[in-house]
Image: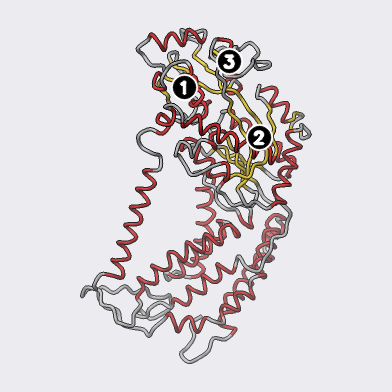
């Protein structure tokens, strides 16, 4: 596409890659792959997006001569210490024509223009983010509601567990995603505790509530070989034994931790009367429980172990006894301790989700919690009843008012007593991220000073009229990041990575056909590695892959 001096760019100059692309697409279309219906549909979709943006690309390429005159200077001889990146097919000493790269970037950006996806919601898989570990109560409810929502929405609903950060990682992942309805957050009572414990600047105001699904009381479990058979025996051990009992059930500062500390304070103990062992949920805590330790969680989460006789329940922190199959478990109130605390679970969307999407999900969720959707002959209500969970449904505004009220109540409970100090510890959870961010800022300032502020040495001469490749490549980094942020949610990771990788290889002087092949292999490979191997959520885009 190199033009001779003094000649204006004609339509044939920029049309060569267009003709080449049509030739390649034409050969693929009439190849033996045309017998594959799925491939033919994919080809038709790609051809449609390509045709939608030809005119936008043409309008930009008409400005290419001016961009080239602005970006490129006359060729110069290579000198020791001076970085020269030759362009493929150009003389050895010729500097690169950065206008070609601008054209490549325009091709990438033009993918997101001129096309409108008018398909009704939902038209691709949906992600439901669970903030706690696999096997716990939150995970069980998340997976059951997901398979029933699939029947209503007609699209897969994939559950991903984003644990860590005392529940903050999963909640942030779900509530800070794109507000397009393709990410649903399973929120728990810890959402109203993060900001009181100074764990994260995340509150119920960052959630658009759909409905609460469940509310369960805390309970205290011990190993079947433990010496305690009743709650008074456990209390006597706390008062008379010098050995502290190790108790687990959730993260440090979670709802089950709050339930245990609140009961200890009401019973006349200090929070350090026990040793709290943080975990990613009730399931790993129950599996790791030893004869001299205890676990605080809900009864349904320990239902199987309780039925098999592997754990023993000393009591439930509820106002009255629960129904079957837990009607034989005494309450703390019956044993002389007037203490009750419940944990809840519900679904929410990121703030800013379109109203029509919200109404679609609310209608589907109403049918699920009403038992109108069946999977293998069973409804969501059948699962709730068989697993022993308590079904507590609050919809829309009612759920939002409940969140506001409980946020105030938990704030008073956490601020009083010694729970805040126990939950937060001596080192805040944001200390390391702040230190890392500060180090990155210092490194960036040092790079800027090194690039533009330091004096040039004799080994790196730079003419007065030379902007230099370092400035260009320095500016290329934020441009590429901005292009990915703007394009990836629309076109998807695979197409965006393919375009950017191909442009990078072409810029480095690789042949065009080699660049396209390598980019075509690397982009889906990277997607498989991160999306399936490392479980990183990546934008799917047009290909929904």
Foreground pick, 118 / 276: 276
Task: Give how far across and how far down residue 316 sits, in percent.
Answer: 57, 17
Secondary structure beneath label 1: loop
Q: Is residue 272 above or below residue 519?
A: above
**Of callouts 1 and 3, the N-terminal one:** 1
Q: Indicate the quadrant where residue 245 lies.
A: top left
Q: Earlier in the sequence, mark 2 or mark 3?
A: 2
Mark 1 → mark 3, Cα distance in angstroms: 15 Å
C-alpha span from label 2 to label 1: 30 Å
Image depth: mark 2 or mark 3 in front? 2
Q: Which residue is mark 3?
A: 306
Q: Are marks 1 and 3 in contact (CB under 8 Å)?
A: no
Q: Residue 65: x, y in percent?
A: 50, 84
Count of number-bearing discs: 3
Asked if residue 434 lies left or right of residue 449, the reply is right
**Residue at the spot 66% in from the left edge and 15% down from the top edge:** 325
Residue at the image position 70 percent from the left and 39 percent from the top: 149
CA distance separating discs 2 and 3: 26 Å
Q: Which residue is identified by label 2?
A: 212
SS state under label 2:
strand
Callout 2 crowding tier (Cα within 10 Å): few <14, some 14–19, many ≥20 = many
Above-or-below relation of 124 to 30 = above
Which numbered dot is residue 288? 1
Is 379 placed above or below 537 here?
above
Residue 457 placement, left or right of 59: left
The x and y percentages for residue 216 are 61, 25
Eyeballing the image, is 95 above or below 339? below
For numbered disc 3, what is the local secondary structure?
helix
Residue at 68% in and 61% down:
45
């Amino acid at each position: 596409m190199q033009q001779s001096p003094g000649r204006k760019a004609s339509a044939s100059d920029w049309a060569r890659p267009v003709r080449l692309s049509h030739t390649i697409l034409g050969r693929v279309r009439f190849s033996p792959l045309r017998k594959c219906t799925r491939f033919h549909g994919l080809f038709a979709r790609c051809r449609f997006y390509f045709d939608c943006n030809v005119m936008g690309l043409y309008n930009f390429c008409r400005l290419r001569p001016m961009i080239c005159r602005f970006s490129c200077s006359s060729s110069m001889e290579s000198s020791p210490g001076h970085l020269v990146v030759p362009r493929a097919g150009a003389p050895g000493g010729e500097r690169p024509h950065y206008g070609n790269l601008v054209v490549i970037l325009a091709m990438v950006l033009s993918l997101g223009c001129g096309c409108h996806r008018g398909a009704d919601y939902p038209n691709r898989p949906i992600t439901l983010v669970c903030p706690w570990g696999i096997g716990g109560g939150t995970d069980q409810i998340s997976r059951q509601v997901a398979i029933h929502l699939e029947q209503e929405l007609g699209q897969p609903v994939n559950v991903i567990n984003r644990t860590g950060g005392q529940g903050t990682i999963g909640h942030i992942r779900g509530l800070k995603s794109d507000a397009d309805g393709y990410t649903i957050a399973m929120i728990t009572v810890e959402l109203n505790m993060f900001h009181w414990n100074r764990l994260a600047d995340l509150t119920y105001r960052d959630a658009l509530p759909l409905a609460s699904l469940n509310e369960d009381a805390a309970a205290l479990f011990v190993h079947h070989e433990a010496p305690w058979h009743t709650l008074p025996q456990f209390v006597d051990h706390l008062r008379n034994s010098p050995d502290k009992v190790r108790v687990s059930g959730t993260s440090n500062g979670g709802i089950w931790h709050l339930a245990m500390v609140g009961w200890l304070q009401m019973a006349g103990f200090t929070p350090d009367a026990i040793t709290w062992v943080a975990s990613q949920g009730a399931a790993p805590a129950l599996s790791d429980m030893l004869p001299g330790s205890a676990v605080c969680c809900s009864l349904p989460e320990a239902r199987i172990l309780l039925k098999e006789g592997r754990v023993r329940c000393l009591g439930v922190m509820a106002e009255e006894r629960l129904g079957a199959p837990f009607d034989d478990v005494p309450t703390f109130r019956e044993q002389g301790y007037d203490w009750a605390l419940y944990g809840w679970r519900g679904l929410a969307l990121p703030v800013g989700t379109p109203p029509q999407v919200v109404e679609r999900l609310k209608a589907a969720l109403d049918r699920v919690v009403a038992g109108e959707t069946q999977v293998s002959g069973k409804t969501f209500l059948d699962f709730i009843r068989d697993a022993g969970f308590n079904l507590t449904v609050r919809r829309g505004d009612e759920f939002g008012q409940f969140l506001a009220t409980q946020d105030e109540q938990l704030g008073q409970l956490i601020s009083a007593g010694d729970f805040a100090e126990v939950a937060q510890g001596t080192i805040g959870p944001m200390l390391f991220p702040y230190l890392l961010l500060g180090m990155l800022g210092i490194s960036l300032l040092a790079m800027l000073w090194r690039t533009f502020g330091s004096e040039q040495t004799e080994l790196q001469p730079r003419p007065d009229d030379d902007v230099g490749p370092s400035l260009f490549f320095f500016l290329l980094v934020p441009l590429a990041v901005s292009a990915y942020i703007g394009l990836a949610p629309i076109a998807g990771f695979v197409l965006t990575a393919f375009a950017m990788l191909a442009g990078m290889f072409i810029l480095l002087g690789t042949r065009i056909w080699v660049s396209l092949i390598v980019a075509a292999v690397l982009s889906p490979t990277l997607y498989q590695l991160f999306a399936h191997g490392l479980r990183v959520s990546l934008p799917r885009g047009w290909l929904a892959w």
